[in-house]
Every structure is written in C-alpha cells, then in structure tokens.
C-alpha cells in the first residue's frame, strides 16, 4: 500500500521507527530511530524520504543535529485537536481543525494513539469534513514538499 501512495503522487515521510524515545532525544537515539525507519521506508518505497515529522513535534538539538547529518527537513504543523488521539466526535475534531486552518498551513491528524493504533473512525470522518469544507471555501491542497519548496526524496 505504501508504494502505491508514493506512486500516486502522495508524499511519504519519516515519523520515527518506534515513536518512543524513552532514552531521550539525543543525536544518537534520534539517528537510530531515523535509520531504522528509513530502512523500512526504502524497502517499501524504493526511495529514501527526506521529510521528517518528529513525534510530538519535538525539536531538540539532538533532533536537529540528526536531521542535518541525514540531509532531512523537519516538518511541523498544527495538531487538529488536542484530544483527537482519544477520538472525540468527528464534528468536534473538524470544527477545531477548521478554526486553525490558514493559507499555507499544515494541519496534523493522527492515525493512532501512543503508537498503538486503534479505531480512527472519528479522525477519518473529521478529515472528510475538513477537506469538503475547505474545498467549498476554495482552498487547494498540495503535498508538503511542494508547500515547503523542498525535495521529498533523495535522488539516489
């Protein structure tokens, strides 16, 4: 499925391998997380992502050093709703997400809770509401690499 997304014009980025940094956010820990995730992603995509959205949007010196060493770009944004991982009603998630939308902005939705997965039906429904509403308001959508003006994948 991942290769199909990348082939269909979607962008797949790195978000860490385990999503758990219990040993801290040092350069060496982050580099290991990046490397493990990159290996899995390259195996699926056939190319190396250059975009990284840190878990919890954390940007320590270790994260920034590791990204610089790998030639990667940190991606940030606004979480759609502070309680969204707990799955409040889709309309609540969508309403707050829409209130935060700005031209050129990135709104972040989750596909799990603390890397455990789970039922994401309220999030899926909220995304549908947000996309439909923004289209009605004449917003357009682009991939994050185009928005930021950076490459999504390495050339080699």
Image (spheres, rainbow, N blue to C red):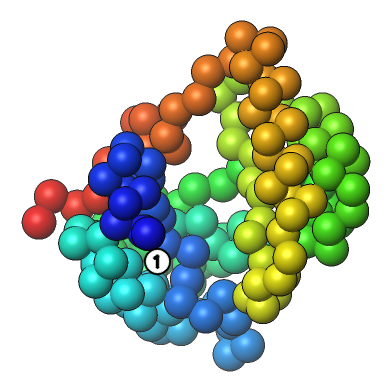
Asked if one can make out residue 50 in the rendered structure from this viewpoint, the answer is no
The residue under the point 83% across, 58% down is 87
The residue under the point 75% across, 41% down is 126
Label 1 packing within 10 angstroms: few (<14), some (14-19), many (20+): some
Q: Is residue 41 left or right of residue 112?
A: left
Asked if one can make out residue 62 in the rendered structure from this viewpoint, the answer is yes
Tell me: residue 118, above or below residue 82: below
Tell me: residue 81, above or below residue 148: below
Residue farthest to the bottom? 23
Place residue 38 in its image quadrant.
bottom left
Q: Position of residue 32 (x, y in %)?
A: 38, 82
Task: Report the front residue among 130 and 57.
Answer: 130
Q: Quadrant of the N terminus?
A: bottom left
Q: Secondary structure at mark 1?
A: helix
Q: Position of residue 42 (x, y in %)?
A: 24, 67
Q: Is residue 36 left or right of residue 60?
A: left
Q: Position of residue 68 (x, y in %)?
A: 33, 60
The residue under the point 57% across, 75% down is 19
Task: Report the front residue among 115 and 151.
Answer: 115
Q: Mark 1 — residue?
A: 65
Q: Position of residue 143 (x, y in %)?
A: 42, 34
Q: Quadrant of the C terminus?
A: bottom left
Place residue 3 in its image quadrant.
bottom left
């Amino acid at each position: 499925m991942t290769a199909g997304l990348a082939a269909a014009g979607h962008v797949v980025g790195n978000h860490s391998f385990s999503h758990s940094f219990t040993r801290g956010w040092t350069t060496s820990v982050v580099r290991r997380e990046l490397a493990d995730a990159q290996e899995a992603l390259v195996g699926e995509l056939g190319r190396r992502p250059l975009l990284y959205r840190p878990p919890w949007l954390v940007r320590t010196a270790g994260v920034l050093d590791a990204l610089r060493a790998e030639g990667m770009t940190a991606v940030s944004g606004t979480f759609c709703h502070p309680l969204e991982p707990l799955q409040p009603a889709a309309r609540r998630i969508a309403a707050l997400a829409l209130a935060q939308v700005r031209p050129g902005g990135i709104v972040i939705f989750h596909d799990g809770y603390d890397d455990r997965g789970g039922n994401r039906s309220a999030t899926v429904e909220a995304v549908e509401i947000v996309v439909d509403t923004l289209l009605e308001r004449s917003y357009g959508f682009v991939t994050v690499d185009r928005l930021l003006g950076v490459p999504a994948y390495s050339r080699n």
